[in-house]
Each structure stands twice: as structure tokens, then as C-alpha cells.
Amino acid sequence: MSNLQLPPIKIILTACGCPGASTLIKRLKGNGEREVKIIGTDINNEAIGRFLCDGFYKVPSGTSNEFIPAMIDIVEKENPALIFPESSNEVLALAKAREKFEEMETKVIVSSPEAIQASSNKYLMYETVKQSGKVDLPEYSSASNLDDFVAASERLGYPESPIVFKPHFGKGSRGVRIIDPKADRKSQLMDEKPTSKYMSFDEFIEIFKDVEDTDFPDFLLMEYLEGIEKTADTLALDGRALLTTIKTVEKARWGVIAEGALVRDDFLVEQTEHVLNSIPLSYCVNVQFIAGRLVEINPRVSTFIYQQNLIAPYLAIKLALGELSEEDVIAYQERIDYGRRMIRYMDQVFHKEWREVL
């Protein structure tokens, strides 16, 4: 006899092939309260979620004009209670189309388009948050051509101090590099894996010296911050932080946490609240800090350090469905298991003709 207390629901989980998808799927299904039927979507036919979800659809990229029509077709076929997006490339399109999905009686766990745009543009994010005067920020600048880049680098202290640059828009650490004139290039070549994020100033100049200003990417430049990254994983509603856990990111692979722990850090919890007061995001939000200063915001679900009695993405679903109040979510703060650690590992799925085989 089943001990599940709540009626079953069906959801669509997008980007079900992303690095954190397999654990998220397992945790949603193992929530202990109800059956959650998950329909996965992804741009890749062999997304891992295809073999863990109850159904699967291949979809166009979230930046394609064909993405929303494809999602509408899937919603018409599946009639889910809600859509839970995992990809930065999809949240804005889904936010803009939210009213259409709600007319189809399907909720979308996503922030407003304005808040997503303000957090996704890394330079605009800093400019917006700076206005409050309450969030600790690194020194930063912006460049839209090579001359701007050189001048901004000098303002930030290069070559006496290392700098970091990243595109205004980007995900998964794409386009992020550290320029440090004191870095040991021989050691990087011989001792590090070929995923090193260091490059020389001369290498940057060589790549972009012949690029026209109209084709030059907009870059955010910032001082290099030393120390272990700490990330706030927050469940929010219209800029109000309801539940925030802080984790250390001690090792990372593929742009996501590989080793880390839940820690108590009241200062970063408060900083996260100030960030959300400036950019009123909703549901699952990821806010990254190094040395106590804001580095980045992701307006979507990230990799949580899960607990059986505290599965934040599942709480986001219940909040969106009206099954929990804001105060109900806040009460879960008492359940945080500080000191809990996580280790990410690789696994494999074997399949033939899209059916998993042993």
C-alpha cells in the first residue's frame, strides 16, 4: 500500500541532459509525498534525462524561434501541471511566453523577463546591483572594442595585478579567462589539464587584433578574486528570499560543482537578500560569491546539496502550485544540515534503439 499523501503530478523538465539533471530527476521522484511524472526535453537526443524521465522530446535551442512553438506542442500533448526550466538559454523565452502557457493551465517556474535580462547580462547585473550600495562588488569595467579592453585592463591594475574577463552574456564558464602575467605558463602546459582558464595578454591581443569593433564581443573585466567560491542557492518569490543555503565550491568540473559542503554564512545570506531586492527574481536562483563579493547570478535552478527532508526544487514546485505559502517555505530554513558534503561522480547509461540495456 502506498504511503504517498498527495495526488500525482506531471511536469516538463527542460534541458534534462545538463550536468545536474540526473540528481534533480531522482530527487523529484523520491520526494516521499507524491508521484512526479517527468517529461524531459533537450536539444540532444542522447540527453541522460531521456533514460531517467517518463517521456522525452527533442526540442530546438532555447534561443531559436522554433523553441516556444515546440514547447506549446508538447504541452498540448502532455497537459503538464508546470514547466521547470534548467537552461539559461531557455528561461527568457519561457518567461516571455508564460501567459500563453498559463492559458493552457500550465505554470512556468521562471522569473519575470525583466529580472532575467538584468541578471543574465553580467555587466548590467553589476550596474543594477551597485545602485543599492549594499552589495560588495569587485572592481569592474566593460569593453566593446580592443582599445577599450586595453584601457580597462590598465584601470583594473594590469599588469601589476591579474584580471578576469568574461562575455556580458555566457554560461558554463564559456569565454571566461584569467590574465595573470605572473602565472607559470610552463607549469600550466605540463601540470594542468587542457581546461586551464589562464591566457596571456598577448594571446588575447593576437586573437582580437583584426576584429572589427562591430564584431568585437562585449566583455566584462574585473579584478581577480582569490579564495574558494561560495554559492547561495535560493528559493525566492518576486525578490523575496524565502530559503537560502550556502555551499562551498571546492572543486568544479564542466563548469559545475564537483566537491563542496553546506556551510553557515549569515553575511552571504544577507548579501543574497540585497541582491534579490535589486533584481526581483523568483523560484530557484543561484548567486555566486568569491571572497565575499558578488561574482555572478544564474536565474535558474543549479546544483543543490540535497537532503531528503529539504529538496528545494520540489518546494519550488509546491510554491508555484499554491500548495505552500511563503511562510511555509521560510520554515524549512531550520532543516538545513550544515556540514553535509557532496561529491559529483561520472556514471554511464547503455542503450540500444533508445531503450536502456544492462
Image: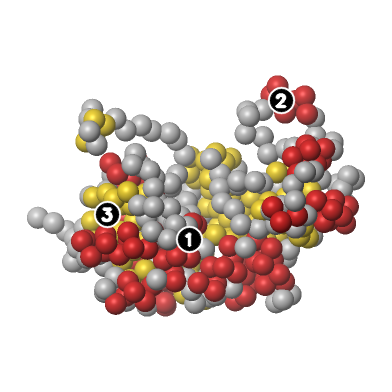
Viewed as shown, does residue 226 lie left or right of 303?
Answer: right
Query: What residue is shown with label 1?
Result: 300
Q: Residue furthest left?
A: 1
x then y, percent, for residue 217: 69, 53
Query: What residue is shown with label 2?
Result: 189
| Residue neighbourhood size for the residue with mark 1, other residues' Cα within 10 Å, grouped as few (<14), some (14–19), many (≥20) | many
Can residue 355 be seen by looking at this rendering?
Answer: yes
Q: Residue at x 13, y 56 (%)?
A: 2
Q: Amino acid type of disc 3?
A: Ile
Along the polypeptide, which appears first: circle 2 or circle 1? Answer: 2
Query: What residue is shown with label 3?
Result: 39
**Numbered disc 3: secondary structure:** strand
Viewed as shown, does residue 136 lie left or right of 278?
Answer: right
x then y, percent, for residue 250: 60, 43
Q: Amino acid type of disc 1?
A: Arg
**Numbered disc 2: secondary structure:** helix
Q: Is residue 294 above or below residue 339?
A: below
Q: Amino acid type of disc 2?
A: Leu
Marks 2/1: CA–CA distance: 35 Å
